[in-house]
Image (spheres, rainbow, N blue to C red):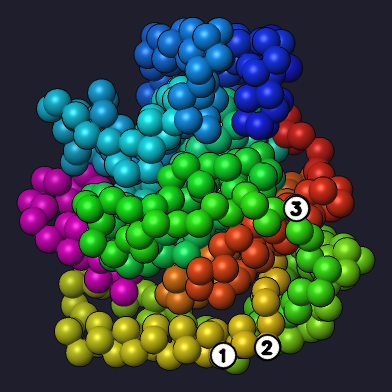
Amino acid sequence: MSELTDLTARQLLTGYEKGDFSPVEATRAALERIEVVQPLVNAFVRVDAEQALAQAESSAERWRKGEPQGLLDGVPVTVKDLLLQRGGPTLRGSMSVSAEGSWGEDAPSVERLRAHGAVFLGKTTTPEFGWKGVTDSPRHGVTRNPYDITRTAGGSSGGSAVAVALGAGPLSIGTDGGGSVRIPASFCGIFAMKPTYGRVPLYPSSPFGTLSHAGPMTRDAADAALMLDVVSGEDWRDWSHLGPADSVRGTLADGVKGLRIAYSPSFGGQVAVRPAVAAAVRRAVGALAGLGAFVEESDPDIADPVEAFHTLWFSGAARLLQHFGPRQREALDPGLREVAGTGARHSALEYLAAVDVRMDLGRRMARFHTSYDLLVTPTLPIAAFEAGAEVPAHSGHRRWTGWTPFTYPFNMTQQPAATVPCGVDEDGLPVGVQLIGARHADALVLRAAHALYESGAANIPPPVPAAR
């Protein structure tokens, strides 16, 4: 049944409906895949095969009766280990979190996946409290890239990206505070989307505040649209949720003809992009133009907001660790301990000045989108680098934000942004193109991404998890 692991969620659902195979067969295939790849890539914190098979049996019975439960009945999914999932601990990659307790509550997105009949395979790896753009932690070690296990999977939703890429369930729910679904999706050759802030409710709220979004990580844009329809909407536990959400699936096939698209290859020369990455992104932009979009090279009127982002991000880390004692701090990721120390030294006035930068950035992007429907950039300026490092060797970067200049600005503005695989570099490592819409233009972002998949521009070779 190994071929079942290559199917999208939609293909699985069609197979269930026709009786070609069952949720039990699909779940067993995914669990078998996990057994094979987990020792190589370390994508999972916990796998609960007994629970997953029990859920799959219940789903199979519903399908036999012709009474599927919701939109995802029987589809194997994984959950990033920052999001609560009842029945087991959420350890957040940290030695400071005790596994003891009842763990009786789902995060809003997990609750909705459960309500729609999804089968939960397990929890996926994250750096400690999701603080950085690669996935390694003191508690769970290093997560590795499915295309080359000597390389990083990216982060902070690295385990989820690897799971989807290797067929350990076609859907995963991740979080993104500065690129954390888009970064690993780009490095691992899958699709991921950070929806407009508040579209997918979060609980508990992130220590990094309103920078953090939850979003789908999937095989393609159509699966993401299906998943987003499931996890969007209201939840009283999140005071900042946007309320009822329209379906994004209805316009998915409308294409890009007539859309006004701005292509910014380097933010006006502010970012050094690897030639192989730039070439792959340029081909994806050409595909959009070939599909009828009006494309022109144009850079948004923004300067790199990294200092303001650091003030907001590091202050969140300081707040997170505020009540940690010396022994707890000693067991932390040293980088997290360092940035939290920096954040603790920021004054309230410095924090509010960073908020001012954020609001100005939001206004500038809103004005930009009066002229353009979408902004297209590389997702990242590089492909995956060595595993176990926060920054590439000899890059001169101090923190992960040094090599993610295209992702974190759009957490500050709360805009929807997605990454689509668009090629591989000279080492066979995936490259992603980023599509960014105005706030609330989630359906438009998905529509353009779907057009790239339908055109074949998003097709890349499948991963082989081995050292090159």
Closer to us: 306 or 327: 306
Q: In the figure, is residue 326 to the left or right of 66? A: left
Q: In the figure, is residue 192 to the left or right of 452? A: left
**Numbered circle sitting on residue 371:** 2
Vertical placement of 437 versus 173: above or below? below
The secondary structure making up most of the magenta span is helix
**Numbered circle sitting on residue 253:** 3
Q: In the figure, is residue 22 to the left or right of 47? A: right
Q: CA distance from mark 2 to mark 1?
A: 7 Å
Instruction: Examine the image and state in which quarter residue 108 appears.
Output: top left
Vertical placement of 153 versus 45: above or below? below
Q: Determine the secondary structure under disc 2.
A: loop
Instruction: Examine the image and state in which quarter residue 15 appears.
Output: top right
The amino acid type of the residue labelled 2 equals Ser
Q: CA distance from mark 2 to mark 3?
A: 23 Å
Labels 1 and 3: the sequence-earlier one: 3
Q: Position of residue 316 (x, y in %)?
A: 25, 66
In the image, the segment drawn in magenta is: 312-335
Q: CA distance from mark 1 to mark 3?
A: 27 Å
Q: Name the residue that disc number 1 marks.
A: 367
